[in-house]
Image (spheres, rainbow, N blue to C red):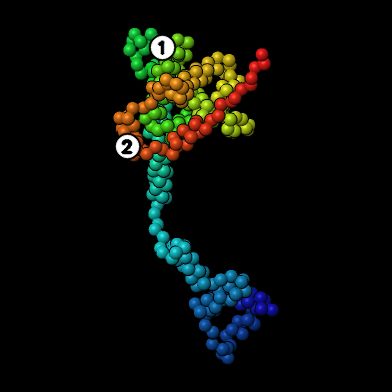
């Protein structure tokens, strides 16, 4: 009933009688009567219109204009404050993006500075020669950065030695894995033995591998240095179990596992850089850790004191915990008694 009354009121208010409408005599007589009551005010006045709108809002079940305005104001005031109640600092989207990019770059720079010095220098060299190889192309990189013995010795193109040690090929999944191994094993060796001793190791590896590479015709030997690092680390604790891919293998077999993976992907010739790295790595390990313990042996690969003072000013007097732990492990290693031969 309430809906019907409202509809009648709206229909009457919004449908005025046209001025040119024809009226019947009875209607005209009714209108011209003197006893007619004076006309009521127009139904379209502001007060009646607002009351009708208010009635329609109530029938519809929605909120009135005033309520909607107040709710919008309250929601905007709530959104303009943080959880703590303080006002939000409103800025443009570009400023927010710039701040996020700057914070990410700052985090990457801090991580880069946190890398140990010698490992950071080697990784930087790898990145520079990789970018140079991408600019020159594959053929240009082979021509300009490969270890050519004639150009290196007679042409004095000495940059070919660090380029052959740092260029790991074009960007690929294999390049990422090699860079990760270089960072992981290089950081472990530098943390255990110190920056000065790690510099001696890298210089010895580059010198020996340069001679082997020029003799055997190997243009780049970056993977050989990675294998030599892994070989030295694995010889320290050879029977320790480590994870390789999805397998658990003893530490001593990990260099052979990396060599096997490259052979399956690239062929039998891919084993040559790994064999070179094992040979030079074992040379360093033998003369650094085994020969000095023999009667008359001498540690001729020890880093000089002035180099340690220069590269490790804070850790020269007190040995690093990693070095102490490695020395304890090497001292506790027991040699097998063997078996007596029957005679």
| Residue position marked by numbered label 2 in the rendering | 313
Q: Is residue 200 above or below residue 317?
A: above
In the depicted structure, whether residue 205 falls above or below residue 154 = below
Q: Is residue 223 visible?
A: no
Q: Nearer the viewer, residue 12 or 250?
A: 250
Q: Which mark is residue 112?
A: none
Please tell me which of labels 2 and 1 falls first in the chain: 1
> Which of the numbered marks, if any, corresponds to residue 148?
1
From the viewer's side, name the closer residue of 49 and 244.
Answer: 244
Q: Are marks 2 and 1 in contact (CB under 8 Å)?
A: no
| Relative horizontal placement of residue 308, taking residue 267 as reference (left or right) | left
Q: Is residue 247 above or below residue 43?
A: above
Q: Residues within 10 Å of mark 1 (few under 14, many from 20)?
A: many
Disc 2 is placed on an element classified as loop
Q: Residues within 10 Å of mark 2 (few under 14, many from 20)?
A: few
In terms of secondary structure, where does tag 1 sit? loop
Q: Position of residue 108 (x, y in %)?
A: 42, 40
Find residue 266 and report its image quarter: top right
> Where's the C terminus, which quadrant?
top right
């Amino acid at each position: 009933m309430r809906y019907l009354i409202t509809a009648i009121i709206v229909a009457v208010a919004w449908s005025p009688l046209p001025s040119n409408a024809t009226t019947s005599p009875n209607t005209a007589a009714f209108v011209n009567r003197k006893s007619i009551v004076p006309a009521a005010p127009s139904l379209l006045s502001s007060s009646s219109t607002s009351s009708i709108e208010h009635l329609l809002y109530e029938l519809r079940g929605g909120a009135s204009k005033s309520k909607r305005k107040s709710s919008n104001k309250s929601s905007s005031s709530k959104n303009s404050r943080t959880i703590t109640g303080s006002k939000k600092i409103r800025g443009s989207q570009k400023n927010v993006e710039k701040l996020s990019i700057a914070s990410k770059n700052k985090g990457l720079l801090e991580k880069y500075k946190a890398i140990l010095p010698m490992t950071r220098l080697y990784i930087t060299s790898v990145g520079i020669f990789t970018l140079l190889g991408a600019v020159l192309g594959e053929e240009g990189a082979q021509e300009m950065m490969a270890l050519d013995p004639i150009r290196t010795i007679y042409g004095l193109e000495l940059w070919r030695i660090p380029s052959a040690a740092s260029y790991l090929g074009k960007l690929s999944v294999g390049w990422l894995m090699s860079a990760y191994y270089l960072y992981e094993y290089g950081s472990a060796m530098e943390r255990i033995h110190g920056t000065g001793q790690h510099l001696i190791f890298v210089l010895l590896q580059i010198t020996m591998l340069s001679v082997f590479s020029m003799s055997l015709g190997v243009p780049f030997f970056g993977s050989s240095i990675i294998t030599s690092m892994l070989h030295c680390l694995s010889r320290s604790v050879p029977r320790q179990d480590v994870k390789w891919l999805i397998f658990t293998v003893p530490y001593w077999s990990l260099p052979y596992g990396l060599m096997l993976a490259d052979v399956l992907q690239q062929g039998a010739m891919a084993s040559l850089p790994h064999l070179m790295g094992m040979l030079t790595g074992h040379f360093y390990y033998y003369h650094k850790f085994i020969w000095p313990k023999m009667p008359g042996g001498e540690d001729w690969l020890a880093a000089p004191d002035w180099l340690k003072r220069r590269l490790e000013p804070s850790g020269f007097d007190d040995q690093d915990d990693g070095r102490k732990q490695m020395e304890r492990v090497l001292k506790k290693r027991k040699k097998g008694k063997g078996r007596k031969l029957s005679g």
